[in-house]
Amino acid sequence: MQRTFWGRLTVLDLISQASEINALLSDDEASEQRATVLEDSFEPCIGQAYDLVLMWDFALHLSDANLNWLNDWLDAMLTYDGAAHGFVCHNATRGLVAKRWGIAGPDQLEAESGSTELPYRHLRGALSRGLPDFQIDKSVLMKDGRLEFVIRRG
């Protein structure tokens, strides 16, 4: 069995730009600004197809209305058999604190807790409605109230 794979890793720090992206996506009159910010933010990915997208808490920085934009972005970025991994909220009444996610080693993720609450609390149903081209393949409830998920094309 092969234990090592080669690949290309592209890292985008979109969470630091999420409030600006979210505001532009919500503003119908900001189409020129939106195009510039999105091109600048996603420039390393444009024209690429990925087998795996690790979006972690990114969806929890977008409003319900903007999940459709995330659907289109994932549709453009993922290969046909690709998957995306992330987290949503399991219980809308429970606040979730933002975390800084990272890759600590070949088989280990790392998360440092912050002090800021995440702005949106999408539940599994909202994620499914907001990402109509994808379906939840697997999900696991985490101790902190996040629902970890893997989605694939529907």
Image (tube, grey):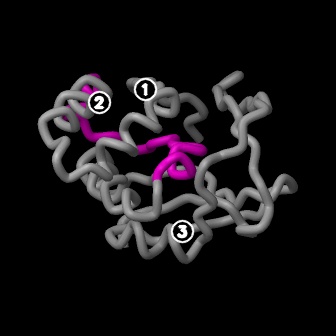
Front one among 11 and 112: 112
Give the position of the N terminus as an image quadrant.
Answer: top right
Residue 48 part of the magenta-drawn span? yes
Tag 3 secondary structure: strand
Residue 92 sits in which quadrant? bottom right
Q: Which mark is first along the chain, 1 or 2?
A: 1
Q: Which residue is mark 2?
A: 42
Residue at 71 percent across and 22 percent down: it is 104
Q: Which mark is first along the chain, 3 or 2?
A: 2
Look at discs 1 and 3 and give the one toward the viewer.
Answer: 1
Q: Residues within 10 Å of mark 3 (few under 14, many from 20)?
A: few
Front one among 2 and 117: 117
Q: Which mark is first along the chain, 3 or 1?
A: 1
Give the Cα distance between marks 2 and 1: 7 Å
Residue 124 sits in which quadrant? bottom right
- Residue that extends furthest to the right in the rendered view of this protein: 143
Horizontal and vertical percent for residue 80? 28, 57
Residue at 65 percent across and 46 percent down: it is 118
Q: Which residue is mark 1?
A: 12
Q: Amino acid at mark 3?
A: Asp
Give the position of the C terminus as an image quadrant.
Answer: bottom left
Highlighted range, magenta: 42-62
Marks 3 and 2: in contact by CB < 8 Å?
A: no
Give the Cα distance between marks 2 and 3: 26 Å
Residue at 84 percent across and 53 percent down: it is 144
Q: Amino acid at mark 2?
A: Phe
> Do we see residue 6 in this rendering?
no
Tag 1 secondary structure: loop
